[in-house]
Structures are given as structure tokens and as C-alpha cells.
Image (tube, rainbow, N blue to C red):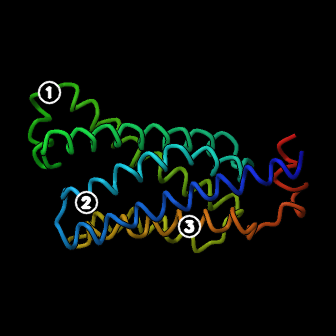
Amino acid sequence: MNLTMEKIFKWLGVLVLLAGITRIGMTPSALVWGTDSTPELLFGFAACILMAASSIGLFLVQRETGAIGFISAMLLVFFNAVTACMVWSLLASGQTGEDLMQDMGANAFIMFTKIMIMIGMFIGTPAFTIATFRAKVFPRWIVYLLLLSMVLPILPGMEKWGALFWGLSYVGMGFVMVTDGYAKQRSHSGGSSAEMMR
């Protein structure tokens, strides 16, 4: 049972790692081809799918975060899933995010979608960062990367760099999960991850 759960955590770690790599791809794509270019949107779409699928794994390895950890993980799943749908619509229609913003007032569904994305972005990600900080399961530098990913996009001229640090934080978490390099060893906190699942 222990071995099986450890393998599951490692495979979830691979998923988190891939999510981070694809998210990182958005920054060079935006710098070379521009914001909302097809390459950037393709990386963004893939990243959203992988992040939605792997968010539950991030909660499972730090279950001591309790309700805030679970709620933030579910918000990340929802946020990434909805964002993936929006990015797909941009790819299919050839629109840009700016075009979509202009349509917001004319289309109630688009407005609702944007509101849901904002909730996930401005509540889900900060809550997950707080939960990760409190759990002390992942190394502190991962928390700092998460903070940078939230701060940089609101700074003038730094909008394209948030995805890089967001992706790096996932690469870091995925690497830790795959290599078992947790900051707080499970054996020191009542057993291994697998044992805590019982």
C-alpha cells in the first residue's frame, strides 16, 4: 500500500512538473511572438489543462493544510479549467484577450467567465500560497516563486514574466514530489505521505 501511494505521488509530481514546463513556455512565446500569439495561447491552454489535473495532487502531499488547502486546490482546478475554455475560444476565433475584454459588457456569459477567472486568480492562488507556506512541506523558495508569479503581472512592463515564475514554482513542486525532497520529512510528522493517506 505504501509503495503504491508513493508511486501515485511521484506520477502526480510528473504531471505537476509538466504543467510548470508548459506554463514557462508562455513567457518566451509572448516575448518573441507577442501577447495572445498562437504559440503563447497553445502553451497556456496545455498548462491550464495540466494544472487543473495536477492541483489535487498538490493538496494530497500537504493535506495538513486542511480546509484552506482543499478549497484553494479546488479553486485552482476550476480556475484553470475555465481559463482553458477561454483560451480555446481565443484560439478558435482568432481573437485576443483585449478583444474579449471589449466584448465583456455585451456578453453576459463572457462577463461571468471573467469573474470566475478573477476569483480563481485572486483568491485561489493566494490561498494556495498561504496554505503552502503554513504546511512547510515544500521548500520556502517555492512559496517565493508563487509570490513573484502573482506580483510581477501587475507591475508595468513585467506582465509577460509572471508565467515564467508561476511555471518555475510548479516545476519546483513537481521535482520535489518526484524526488521525495520535501522540506518537512513525512516520517517526522506522523508518517510518510502514504501512511497519512490511511
- Secondary structure beneath label 3: helix
Residue at the disc numbered 1: 107
The residue sitting at 31% across, 69% down in the picture is: 27
Residue 141 placement: quadrant: bottom right
Q: Position of residue 32 (x, y in %)?
A: 20, 73
- Secondary structure beneath label 2: helix
- In the figure, is residue 53 to the left or right of 177? left
Where 169 falls versus 77 (above or below)? below
The residue sitting at 56% across, 57% down in the picture is: 16
Residue at the disc numbered 3: 143
Sequence-wise, which precedes: disc 3 or disc 1?
A: 1
Q: Position of residue 15 (x, y in %)?
A: 57, 54
**Of the residues shown, which amino acid type is indicated by label 3?**
Val
Q: CA distance from mark 1 to mark 2?
A: 27 Å
Residue 98 vs residue 12, the one in the foreground: 12
- Secondary structure beneath label 1: loop
Q: CA distance from mark 3 to mark 1?
A: 37 Å
**Of the residues shown, which amino acid type is indicated by label 2?**
Pro
Q: Position of residue 155 (x, y in %)?
A: 26, 69
Depth check, mark 3 against mark 1: the one in front is 1
Residue 95 vs residue 161, the one in the foreground: 95
Residue 82 - label: none
- In the figure, is residue 130 to the left or right of 38? right
Q: CA distance from mark 2 to mark 3?
A: 28 Å
Q: Position of residue 170 (x, y in %)?
A: 53, 62
**Of the residues shown, which amino acid type is indicated by label 1?**
Asn
Residue at the disc numbered 2: 39
